[in-house]
Image (cartoon, grey):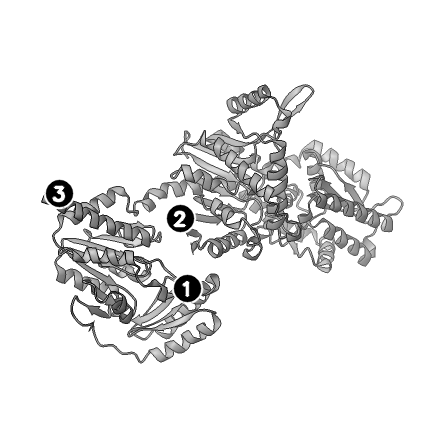
Amino acid sequence: MKKQQRLIIISNRLPIQVTKDDDGLKFSPSIGGLATGLRSFQKQHNVLWIGWPGIDTDHLDASEKNKIKIKLIEDLDCYPVFLTKEDIKYYYAGFCNKTIWPLFHYFTQFVDYDNRFWKSYKLVNEMFYEKASEIIKSDDIVWIQDYHLLLLPKLIRSRYSDVNIGFFLHIPFPSYEIFRLLPRRNELLEGMLGSDLIGFHIYDYVRHFKSSAHRILGAEVEMNKLYFKDREVNVDSFAMGIDYEKFSKAALTDKTEAKVNKIREELGDVKIILSVDRMDYTKGILQRLEAFESFLEKYEEYRTRVTLVFIVAPSRLKVEEYQVLKGDIDEFVGKINGLYSTIGWVPIMYIHQTMQFKNLVAFYKIADAALITPVRDGMNLIAKEYLSCKTEGKGVLILSETAGAAKQLPEAILVNTNNKEEMVEAIFKAMTMSDEEQARKLAVMQERLKNKDVFRWAEDFVDTMIQLRNEAPERTLKFLDSRSKEKLIENYLKSDKRLIILDYDGTLVEFVKDPNDARPDEELLSILNKLAMDDTNNVYIVSGRDKKDLDKWLGDMNIGLVAEHGFWIKEIGDEWEQIEPIKTDWKDGVRSIMERYVDRTLNSFIEEKEISLAWHYRSAESELGAIRARELEIDLLNYSHNLNLQVLHGNKVVEIRYANINKGRIVSRLISTKDSSFLLIVGDDATDEDMFAIAPESAFSIKVGLQRTKARFNIISSRATRLLLKDLIESEKYRLEVQNL
């Protein structure tokens, strides 16, 4: 990134916390992985930050708001979005933390779908957009953070079509079956898809997001790219790290060592298991206590020899679910300590407060094991912080397999939080693991965390955004923009012999689930008739459809027809001509293979043509259909490897056909026989690439859709094809009117 190029970070909270007391306003740094991770960019790049300063406007007068603005903008490059107490109640505490938070963490029983929450969420996202629109310039890079601002990418995109927008979700993205429960699921997905790059911690969340975008919105998926409406969106995983050096160096200080000694004096000569979390039902805190109780019950020899340091930071204590959780934790801890405590030993040291950094590092360093077992967690940085403080080569991490960090830390003891027996055995394994095994596993995990720290995470994400921006001109050059369209029309008007070759499905008519619904409407018939009435035009429909359909729909028009990808051709006024004789003895074997896939895939069907068999899955469940199509493609390739057959995977269809027949061959014949000075070729499918491949450089070849292509240009949809053809008709009409004058 150039020094002068601006990076605009937008998050719910600013890296600066504003508070107010009797002495006036106070400004202090926010503590958190995001602020830490992006600190390096503030030194290297021109960074601006938009967010809420942490204080509601109900406690501020006009002069205080102005003072906050001046201080944040002029001194800290931070632009505040001011929220009222009601905004915080319905947007933050409401939709963010009573709707999105529980649903995305699979706690559907706690989800509140109050429509007031949604209205406030939408309003606040619009407030963030208004603030951003005061600042953003077209060459900025905008990085939006987390679930509080899911609508913001689309809002910004609506005004800034060329700005580079990234979005990162710091919590899990749930499976399609969970996400679809949201009444506002479409709006949230469309909001996120306003981005150029969407990042998640692990690939599981990428997979869930792609599935939801595909199933709910119909977005097309190609590897880690989504195609939605007129845009390409990149989706990938970027595992967030920690400031490793900060923790590892802090663990080596004399102050930390003194604190460690003080803890040892208080707890005595026992093994220490550490649990650190904030109060939240997603963290599996009660399951952890149950497992520890069962451990003490099963392994009696560890009574008086092990202590669980149980640190729970207060969180959202005004929310009913959290109040109930705290009551249950207090009761459970009291029960265990009541059952097993002896003179001089208490099984659980329960600390219900926010831990200062220096004290937390000391507990990390002294703990023999860390028990980090959330039911669901986007990443979980506590596990990484613990490992970074184990500077003496000893320590065991017990980690939930449903924490995002588990993907990066397979050397940890991974457990199912809901399997109490497995949790008990994990604690026992941690207590009995040899020093050599501890050191070996620690070294591997620590090296990985050093290399993938929070600074590397931020650099990787921003570098990917920059790379996408640098590649953008290559991608956008393929679009038939206004200048290219003017050139096309100019060449069309100059030519007195024109050849216009058009695919049918997906090119002239919208792709539909039922092929019988694709018959031409009045508008299309009018367009084709007007093109054909011009004596300088030779118009051909080159389709994969059966000749019966084309004859029935278009046979009485003054245009040429090509069916079954070039096997049949019908010149104007002539009968259908077969290009060459072929053998079809291969069909029985292929049909039996396809019939198995029809049986296994509801609403799929087989279409038989003269030279081909096609398995259609346009009406099948989309994700299953795509999987079955890949399987069928492999089976057909294996079956046909010694036969003169070609397997094509098109738009919701897998087709196998005689290899010598393709659209490129018939289009090559048309080009050589029609002697035209203007050539337009438009198609949308994989089979149309054969036409584009043989087109001369002077031809205007156009791919309908956003996929990579051999065509010179891309347009968005079949509607855009019709508009282009209408423009050609109107331009010729205008030229003739001028001549007549």
- Amino acid type for the residue under numbered disc 2: Glu
Residue 165 vs residue 308, the one in the foreground: 165
- State how far apart marks 1 and 2 are (Cα): 22 Å
- Of the numbered discs 2 and 3, the one sitting upstream in the chain is 2
- Of the numbered discs 1 and 3, the one sitting upstream in the chain is 1
Local crowd at mark 3 within 10 Å, few (<14), some, or many (≥20)? Answer: few
- Of the numbered discs 1 and 2, the one sitting upstream in the chain is 2
- Amino acid type for the residue under numbered disc 1: Arg
Name the residue tied to disc 3: 738
Q: Quadrant of residue 165?
A: top left
- Amino acid type for the residue under numbered disc 3: Val
Q: Quick check: 295 above or below 490?
A: below
Single out the mark in the foreground, 2 or 3. Answer: 3
Q: Where is residue 338 shown, x and y percent of the image?
A: 86, 48
As drawn, is 688 to the left or to the right of 436? left
Name the residue tied to disc 1: 618
As drawn, is 157 to the left or to the right of 91? left
Q: Where is residue 263 shown, x and y percent of the image?
A: 77, 38
Q: Quadrant of residue 607?
A: bottom left
Single out the mark in the foreground, 1 or 2. Answer: 1
Q: Quick check: 28 above or below 401?
A: above
Q: Where is residue 377 shown, x and y percent of the image?
A: 62, 48
Q: Quick check: 98 above or below 624?
A: above
Name the residue tied to disc 2: 232
As drawn, is 400 to the left or to the right of 467? right
Q: Quadrant of the N terminus?
A: top left
**Residue at screen point 57% across, 49% down:** 172
As drawn, is 485 to the left or to the right of 461? left
